Image (cartoon, grey):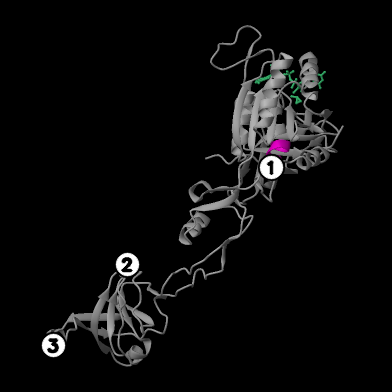
Amino acid sequence: MRTVEAQLRRVLDAAVRPAPIRVDISASQGLLCAEEVVADRALPGFDQAAVDGFAVRSVDVLAAADEPVELPVVGEVAVGSRQAHRLQPGQAVRVATGAPLPTLADAVAPHDHTDAADDPASRATGHRARLTVKTPVPSAAWVRRVGEDVAPGDVVVRRGAPVGAAQVGLLAAVGRTKVLVHPRPRVSVLAVGDELVDLDRTPGTGQVVDVNSYALAAAASDAGAEVTRLGIAATEPAALREAVASALARSEIVVIAGGVGGRLGEDVQDTLAQLGPVDISRVAMHPGSVQGFGRLGGEEIPTFLLPANPVSALVAFEVLVRPLIRLTLGKQDLHRREVTAALLSPIASPPGRRSYVRGRLLRDRATGEYLAQPLGSSGSHLLSSLAEANSLIVVDEETTEIGMDAPVRVSFLAPRS
Ligand SMILES: Nc1nc2c(c(=O)[nH]1)N[C@H]1C(S)=C(S)[C@@H](COP(=O)(O)OP(=O)(O)OC[C@H]3O[C@@H](n4cnc5c(N)ncnc54)[C@H](O)[C@@H]3O)O[C@H]1N2
Ligand code: MOO
């Protein structure tokens, strides 16, 4: 039996990474940047007022520390003003937040530092108002300096950085319409099984609705892949070979649920062997121990044969496929967050296998301590208990029993609202 680690290594070694692509910045969110994005401009692009107030020379209002200083207001600069403004020593200009600062001004006195009054005498000289500055403002106060955020030549988004809302904002700010990113890996999902019918049919006696292609497609999409759910594959060898070959041609990862055991399994494996070597092995895990993996087709596309019991399929996906999708996306961190929790009821685990026990992770309000409640039976067909779970309790290979209150390793599943 191969350890989970050894199987994961084989899987990750087989990763096929799609070449980076250039996309609109609006489509880049959630992907990893594949280039160093260098700013060709400064942000802010010019010195500007950080508040509504009056642009002044700080030296002209120094004396306001002792007594109010009066200045004539010689003009007004609105946001977006494209006209050059200039003030002379001893003058003030009314400015709005974001307006370009007049030449010579090096500070803004906010409204609450000042009193402004209409002054007929100063109006006669062309000035609109007299300003009383009650508090001095030091140089650069209430000014957003050119290049303070980003200087030309700065890297605004690093290669390998996840693109989130702030990165999309920076790309827009430096005028980039497109950005090079690692695309989502394309994952194709198929199910095989003679008993399967699609969900638009009422299953007859002995028939089972195909759950796996839907559930695995959802899991792949949640992991960040671009998914094609191909549904139930024909089991007639030529048709199956054709279906898998066409999936290989359009995917970086192929996931097939079923075909691991029994007569059908042998037929499926024989057919797949025409496309490349498939290794069916027992992996030291529970559930999901019997599985197949190979690199198929000319491009050696990593291809999984997952055990068909729905819980086994999803757990095997979680443990082996999800990390491969994340690696293919370019992520550094391939695994879910793990915490240590106190076990709320005892669990058993088969010897020599790592168990993934469905659980609910709780937090003790008073102590902040994590608590793990194992859910129901461990049957691999019991999908509703996986739906109840928000985590998997991971029991190592050597342990066969864990008592109440003992510390256990718990891996988060997708966060739920
Ligand atoms: N000789 C052995 N037989 C089996 C073993 C074993 O170790 N030795 N392990 C059992 C376990 S556990 C699993 S899991 C399966 C894995 O084999 P397959 O992947 O070929 O699974 P099947 O036997 O075809 O199906 C198992 C179960 O799942 C249902 N199923 C199948 N496909 C779907 C689908 N798309 N959606 C929902 N449910 C599906 C199927 O009807 C069966 O009930 O092998 C066991 N046998
Ligand atoms: O491999 Mo089966 O994986 O335990 O349901």
What segment carries the magenta color?
A: 318-326
Residue at left offset 80%, top offset 28%: 276
Q: Quadrant of residue 358?
A: top right
The alpha-carbon separation of the residues under discs 3 and 1 comes to 76 Å
Kindly indicate whether the residue at mark 1 contacts the one at mark 3 (C-beta within 8 angstroms): no
Give the mark, 2 or 1, whose residue is nearer the N terminus: 2
Question: Residue at the front extreme?
Answer: 298
Mark carried by residue 121: 3
Side (left or right) of 155 relative to 141: right
Give the mark, 3 or 1, whose residue is nearer the N terminus: 3
Task: Name the residue beneath numbered marker 1.
Answer: 411
Task: Name the residue beneath numbered marker 2.
Answer: 80
Identify which amino acid the numbered label 1 is placed on: Ser
Badge 1 marks a residue whose secondary structure is: strand
Quadrant of ligand 2 in image: top right
Question: Which quadrant of the figure contains the N terminus?
Answer: top right
